[in-house]
Image: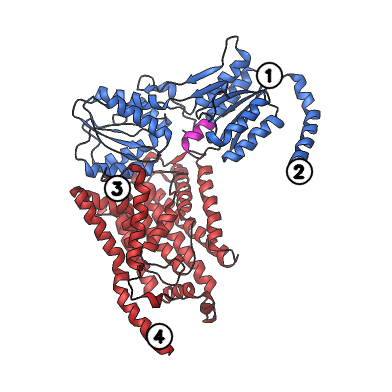
Amino acid sequence: MKLKTLSAFALTSVMALTGAAAWAEDTIKIGVSYPTPTHAWAAGMNWHAEQAEKRLEALYPDIDLVLINSPDPSAQASALEDLVSVHQIDALVVLPFESEPLTDPVLNVKKSGALITVVDRGLSQPGIEDIYVAGNNPELGRVSAVYMKGRLKDGDNIVVLRGIPTIIDNERFDAFMAEIEGSGINVLDHKHANWNRDDGFEVMQDFLSRFPDIDAVWAQDDDIAIGVVAALKQAGRDGDGMFVVGGAGMKETIKGIMEGNELVPVDVLYPPSMIATAMDVTVAAFKSNGPVAGRYILGATLITQENAASFYFPDSPF
Amino acid sequence: MSAVTTDYEKTAKRLSFDLKTAGPAVALVILCVIGFLLNPAFLSEGNITNLLTRSAFIGIIAVGATFVITAGGIDLSVGSMAAAIAGVMIITMNAAIDTMGSGVATVLLGCGVSILLGIGAGWVNGALTTKGKIEAFIVTLGTMGIYRSLVTYFADGGTLSLNFDIRGTYRPVYYDSFLGLPIPVWVFIVVAILGWLLLNRTAFGRYCTAIGSNEAVAKYSAIKVDRIKTMTYVIQGFCVSLATIIYVPRLGSASSSTGVLWELEAIAAVIIGGTVLKGGYGRIGGTILGALILTTIGNILNFTDMISNYLNGTMQGLIIIVAVFLQRGDWGKSRKSED
């Protein structure tokens, strides 16, 4: 504890000297903190954050964005401390690893006077963030169900592959089932495929052995959908108007939609680029003449052949 | 006095032997009956082929794990190793497309890379354990983390995908059949037979058992303990590379979520099959049954909606414990031989 205080003191004094120069230029420093990407969606987010950094810094010479990713919640908490003490940020854009352990660290950043933008995952205490940007999980389920209802008729059968058992998965699933209810479409069964291609493949194989008549599949996620499509092709049941609805907006899936893929004709957006939206809004808080604080819930847009091009980023890893 | 005890132990062992051998088989048969009762489609040809093909990955890896565990070691790195090898295979094949085209040669190159990497990675695990004198648990825990993060790095956090043209050439390795059985199942069968011969009919197999029972005694009996132990890890690595070679054509992709928890499934298959975790006794036949049991559990759970999805792990855990209890269960007669 003593050592920590001492080093913090030493650090502050050094900062006071070197920081004086930076202050004079009057740059606006914005810290951007998110988990180290370990899966494709997060890698896409990382890519979009880097793109937004380049674009915004080119647009506003006095804006300095500092991107930091952390491999676990406690590392992210330390990264937030560093953003305040070393970089003396004016605003923070944060996608918390987990809500609970990061609520206090973000609160501490707020106490330093910085503007707080929270992305995707809320904090466990209300009122900390000035700006909130997130995708819409229930809407993703609802939009998927609306599309299913448009394509299927009374008495048709579907199966559902779910993600990892979490609140996100429950929100999507419950909204989907609520929208499907009363439509006459039978949901034969639902199993967890953990947002994973291999699990999607195996669960779908078993559904195909178990149910001789399936008309469509809600895979909820583009990775699961890839496994589902492989299983359908293996069993030779990819024809007869069979279709699969995934979700998220993976570039390969969107490319397929642009090319008119009949098996995966649409996708429902849950965009990793939401981090870029959050960075834009945060910069706007310093640059816009309009008010900016508030909650931004992004739409779960249905991506079809007509609008697919505007969601296609061939250079992104996702 | 001691002669009498040995005789007693021998009879005790003979009595319990039947149950020990039959344990996993009985468990598998019971599972299949349950599956059939839940849904007759369980025994359809399509489902049986799916089950066998799916078991091939874990099964092949578990054959290698049987050697490692019999010789008193453990390898936690196999799942990550499979993911890293799959990643490098895909990168190599994609890169070779310009010079070698998208034909069989490129696929063979990928397979060659896989085998070299598997053997190399196994040798590293073995050498660090024997020459480096670090516990196998720590060595392979370390390499597990290394391989897992390497595949994440290669894929830039995302997913590595095999070029579409090569996929066409490579696809039959997973999806095609020979004499009615899918090719992965044939690979599984060949690996199982070779593994059984190696463990039960060669000096190498006896050395593995001897080292696992008592390493010091094995050393004094002029067994080259370090070399044999390293060889078990090399065999394990080779098995992982074979499993990867039949895994990659399935979906043509590798990511950080590839092969997650395969190490635990492989170890579970080995132990369910009757091999002793602390070494000294190994059974390839049991391992095969163990792998089949594990896949069947998952399959059956997908065939019913009677059990909440959230309780899948509970069912798996219960069945694994019951299966091991069936064969280890102290049925009164073998108690004294356990000490």
Whether A231 is drawn above or below B14: the answer is above
Asked whether disc 3 touches disc 4, contact meaning CB atoms under 8 Å apart, the reply is no
Q: Furthest-top residue in view? A: A289
Q: Specify few, some or many for label 4: CA neighbours under 10 Å numbering under 14, 14-19, or 20 or more.
A: few
Does any portion of residue B180 appear in the rendered image? no
Real-space CA distance between mark 3 and mark 2, rounded to the nearest whole angstrom: 55 Å
Percent x, y of residue B197:
36, 71
Q: Which SS class for mark 4?
A: helix
Q: Which residue is mark 2?
A: A3
The residue positioned 19% from the left and 37% from the top of the image is A213
**Residue type highlighted by circle 4:** Thr
**Residue type highlighted by circle 1:** Asp
Say which colour chain B has: red
Q: Which residue is mark 1?
A: A62
Q: Which SS class for mark 2?
A: helix
Percent x, y of residue B24:
31, 64
Real-space CA distance between mark 2 and mark 1, rounded to the nearest whole angstrom: 36 Å
Observer-nearest of B336 and A216: B336
Residue A38: in magenta span: yes
Real-space CA distance between mark 3 and mark 4, rounded to the nearest whole angstrom: 47 Å
Q: Which residues are magenta?
A: A35-46
The residue positioned 42% from the left and 21% from the top of the image is A299
Say which colour chain A has: blue
Residue B188: in magenta span: no
Q: Specify few, some or many for label 1: CA neighbours under 10 Å numbering under 14, 14-19, or 20 or more.
A: some
Looking at the rendering, in which quadrant would you find the C terminus of chain B? bottom left
Does any portion of residue A256 appear in the rendered image? yes
